[in-house]
Each structure stands twice: as structure tokens, then as C-alpha cells.
Amino acid sequence: YEMRFEGNVKTKELEELVSAVNHMAATLSEQENLRRRLTTDVAHELRTPLTTVASYLEAIMEGVWEPTTERLQSCYDEIDRITRLVSDLEGLAQMESENLRLEKLEINFLELAKNVGNNFAAELDKKKLHLSIEGEPAIVSVDEKRMIQVIANLLSNAVKYSHESGQIRIHIKDTEENVLFVMEDDGIGIPAKELSLVFERFYRTDKSRNRKTGGAGVGLTIAKSIVDAHGGTIAVDSEEGKGSRFIVTLPKHTRS
Ligand code: ADP
């Protein structure tokens, strides 16, 4: 922005300057608010499991509680939760850093999805879920490791938010322009008013907030930033009580 004052300061130029400064101030305060919220959220996410572990250990050390396997398991689960949160945060920070470098390779997306699916065999069995992966062997140039993470994050949500004996369907579609990854589950679904929020950091629907199985709410944020980095899009469509559908669209021809 360049201002020149010749003789009298012109009202119009002053107005423009004021508006530019206001805009800058608003952007800065928005960023500051976001940063502050992030810190508060992380602190909160850490405090809950830490309080649990501390109070369990205290009761055991004071001899109030027997160190039963069940109680130790609870402590372990909470520590596991903290560990996952920390690695999620690392992943998020890495994704959001400026110098995100993708190591792209031509891969068959159907094969990739099937490989990730195989890694979920035990989790699927535990809930008696049925997973089908079908479609076209679409070839696309992606960062394989990161795409595995996208599919794994989506699939792990489908598992978490499905009822016992549910169905999860993955369909790979190959169009002229894009490769589409469509995943449908018949689980608990997402309330319409919360749909637009699920990709936000630390967002969890009220339902999953109360669940033991819920994560920290960054899985979809990470998935979205990976897909964004590939020039693709990720969308969700859901009906509460019926199930959800996530659609990842990846461009086959990128400019870079
Ligand atoms: P979380 O670690 O809590 O699963 P995510 O970022 O992966 O965090 O997801 C954010 C929220 O979106 C979840 O807490 C859950 O409320 C909702 N969600 C995500 N996937 C599904 C799904 N397949 N079915 C129902 N709700 C889902």
C-alpha cells in the first residue's frame, strides 16, 4: 500500500489507510484468538487424562485402592490417549508447516485402500464389522505414506462410530479428471448442524465427546490438510442415526 500526500491529505486516501489498518488488525487478532484457543484446547485435552492417572496412582499409593489389573489398565489407556494426542499434534504441526513436501509416486489407489483395509482386520473383527472395498484400479500420483494416513484416519472413524455388526463400504472411482475415494458407514452419523465443523481442529460432536473411544478430534483435520496439499477436496455427508459418507477427490493432473 502506497500513500502519497500532496498538499492536503485527501479524505479518500485516509479512509483507505484506516480500512487497511483495520483489516490488518482484524486478521492479527483472529490469528491470535486461534492460537490461544489451540493452547487452551491442548491443555484441556491433556488435563483430563492426566487427572485420571494421577488420582488412580494416588489412591493406589495411599493404599486406598488395590492395584488391580483393571485399574492399571485404565491408567495405561489414559497414557495411551495422551501419547496419541501428542503424536496427532506433531502430525498436525508438520502438516501445517510451510514447507510441507510431498513425495509423490504413481500408485494404484484401489490397492492402497485394500492394504490399509487389511491392517484394520483386528479392529473390524472386534466389532464384527464388515468392510468391502471395490472399484476401479485408479492410478494417481500421491504421497503414499500420507495418503495411507488419510484412509486410516477415515477408516478408524468409521470403525469408532459404527454399531456392532455394521457395514463399511469403500468405493474407488476413476474419472477423467479425478480419483474418488468414497467411504460409507451405517454408524451413528453426524448431526446436520455439526457437519461443517468436523474438519476443525479438536472438534468432536457432543455424542463422541462423551464416548470413551473418541480421539482428540484432529484426525479429520490432518486428513483434510493432506488432501488439500494434494490439490484435492474432502467432503462429508451424513444423517444422524443412519450413517456417514466421506468423499475424497484427488486430481489426476496437478500443475506442480
Ligand atoms: P476423533 O479423533 O474425535 O475421531 P476426528 O477429527 O477424526 O476426531 O473427527 C471429528 C469428529 O467427527 C469425531 O469426534 C466425530 O464426532 C465425528 N465423526 C468423524 N467421523 C465420523 C463417522 N464416520 N461417523 C460419525 N461421526 C464421525
Image: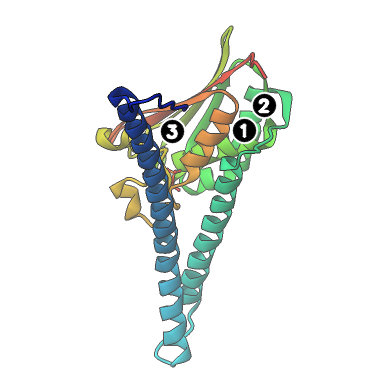
Q: Quadrant of ligand 1?
A: top left
Left or right placement of residue 156 versus residue 113 in this view: left
Decide which of tag 3 and tag 1 comes sooner along the chain.
1
- Residue annotated with mark 1: 147
Q: Which amino acid does label 3 sit on?
A: Gln
Q: Are marks 2 and 3 in contact (CB under 8 Å)?
A: no
Q: How far across and down, in percent of the image, does residue 76 sit?
A: 53, 69
Q: Which amino acid does label 1 sit on?
A: Met
Decide which of tag 2 and tag 3 comes sooner along the chain.
2
- Residue 109 occupies which quadrant of the picture? top right
Find residue 167 and name its label. 3
Q: Callout 2: helix, strand or loop?
A: strand
Residue at the image point whose x is 25% and y is 35% from the top: 193
The answer to whether any part of residue 163 appears in the image is no
Residue 149 in the image: above or below residue 15: below
Residue 58 in the image: above or below residue 83: below
